[in-house]
Image (tube, rainbow, N blue to C red):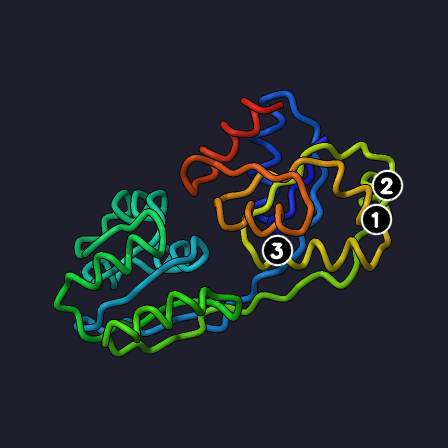
Amino acid sequence: MILITRPKDKALKLENKLSRCGYECHIESLSEIKFKHQNFFFKKNCIYLISSPRTVSYVIRHKLENLHIKLLVIGLSSMHKLKQAGFKNLIYGAQHSDDMIHFLKKSEITFIHYLTGTIRNKNLSREITKIGINLKEEIMYETTFKKNLSKKCVSLIRSKKIRQILIYSKANAEHFIYITNKAKIEKESKSATFFCLSKKIATFLKNKGYHAKYSTTPTEASLIKKLINNS
C-alpha cells in the first residue's frame, strides 16, 4: 500500500493515477494550504519568481489580466503549465533552485518579487540577495500542518501494510518524522521506502535512518515512474 501525504486536492488526483496503475493507496494529508490573496495585483514592470506549483496554479487562475507579467520559474513542469496557459514573458525556467541562481548570476536583473508561502526555501532567498539582487518576498499562502495522524494511518504503519510513502518536500519529511515519533511508530515507519521529489529530500531522510529513493527529475510523472520501476 502507498501512503500519499499531499494536501487533499492534489492527493485525490494522485490517488486516481496510481489506482489506474493497480496500486492501493491511503491518503493522509500532512498539511493544508490556505491562500491569503483572492485577487493579488500584479505590476507590469516587476519580475516575479515562482518556485511553488501552488503559486503557479494561482497565477494561472488569474491569468486573464496577467498574461504579460514577467516570470522566473523553478520547476520544468510548472514552466510547461505556464506556457500552455499562454503566458508571454517567461524569462527563464529552471529545473531547480541552483539552476536559477546560476542563471541570475549571469543576468542583469536587479529586483525580484518572490511569490511564495510560509514554508519556503530560505536558502534560495539568501543566495539571491548574496548576488546583489534586491528581493521582496510576498507570502501568497499559509501552510498548516496536521497535529496527529489518523488512527487508521497509525494502524496501517504499525502493521507494516504501508510499504511506500510519497514525500514532496523537506518540510513534509520533517513533519512526518515528528508526527510518527509522536505516535510511537518511528521504527515501523522505517520499514517502508520513501519516494521523494528530490535528492535533497531523500538525503535528509537517509541521514535520519530511513530508506529513501528520489525521482530523476523533480516532477510527479518522474516520481510515479520511479515508484513503478522500484515496486
Q: Quadrant of the N terminus?
A: top right
Q: Answer few, some or many: residues within 10 Å of disc 2's Cα (few below 14, many 20 plus, some between 14 and 19).
A: some
Label 3 CA crowd tier, 10 Å (few <14, some 14–19, many 20+): some
Mark 2: which amino acid?
Answer: Arg
Identify which amino acid the numbered label 1 is placed on: Ile
Q: What residue do we see at 62% from left, 53% from top?
A: 173
Secondary structure beneath dot 2 equals helix
Left or right: residue 115 versus residue 192 is left
Q: Is 27 or 137 nearer to us in this picture? A: 137
**Most extreme residue toward the left, as rendered?**
108
Say whether disc 3 or disc 1 marks the residue closer to the N-terminus. Answer: 3
Q: Please give the residue where the numbered disc 2 appears in the rendered image.
A: 158
- Dot 3 falls on a residue whose secondary structure is helix
Where is mark 1, residue-wise? 185
Callout 3 amino acid: Asn
Looking at the image, do the residues carrying marks 2 and 1 touch, with CB atoms under 8 Å apart?
A: yes
